Image: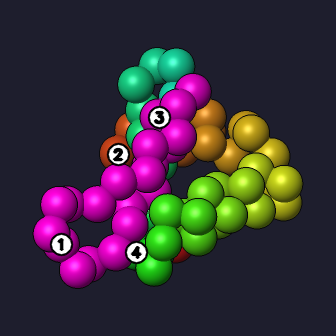
Amino acid sequence: MSVEIYRLAGGEEGWSLEVVDHDGGSTVWEDRFATDSDAYAEFYQTLETEGIKSFLEQQPGSAKH
């Protein structure tokens, strides 16, 4: 599993958060975050409250929040 936090260079839309599982399925948050730290905090909070299986049970390309 990998956690990908990114934004377009020069973009003002904020940071994107995506979790990619070992099978290539991804969970993408629809919301944008003000900072990369905010995005990571959201990932960590979801991990703590819903557990790692919440990312594995998502269908490829599914969206969160």
Mark 1, residue position: 11
Secondary structure of the residue carrying tag 1 is: loop
Q: Amino acid at mark 4?
A: Arg
- Residue at point 61% right, 57% down? 40
Q: Which-is-in-front pick, marks 2 and 4?
A: 4
Residue 10 within the segment the image draws in magenta: yes
Mark 3, residue position: 20
- Residue at point 43% right, 51% down? 5
Quick check: marks 4 and 1 in contact, CB under 8 Å?
no
- Foreground residue, 37 or 39? 37
Q: What is the C-alpha distance between the residues marked 3 and 1?
A: 23 Å
Label 4 neighbourhood size at 10 Å, few (<14), some (14-19), many (20+)?
some
Q: What is the C-alpha distance between the residues marked 2 and 4?
A: 17 Å
Q: Amino acid at mark 2?
A: Gly
User: What residue span does the magenta drawing correspond to?
Assistant: 1-20
Q: Earlier in the sequence, mark 3 or mark 1?
A: 1
Mark 2, residue position: 61
Quick check: marks 3 and 1 in contact, CB under 8 Å?
no
Secondary structure of the residue carrying tag 3 is: strand
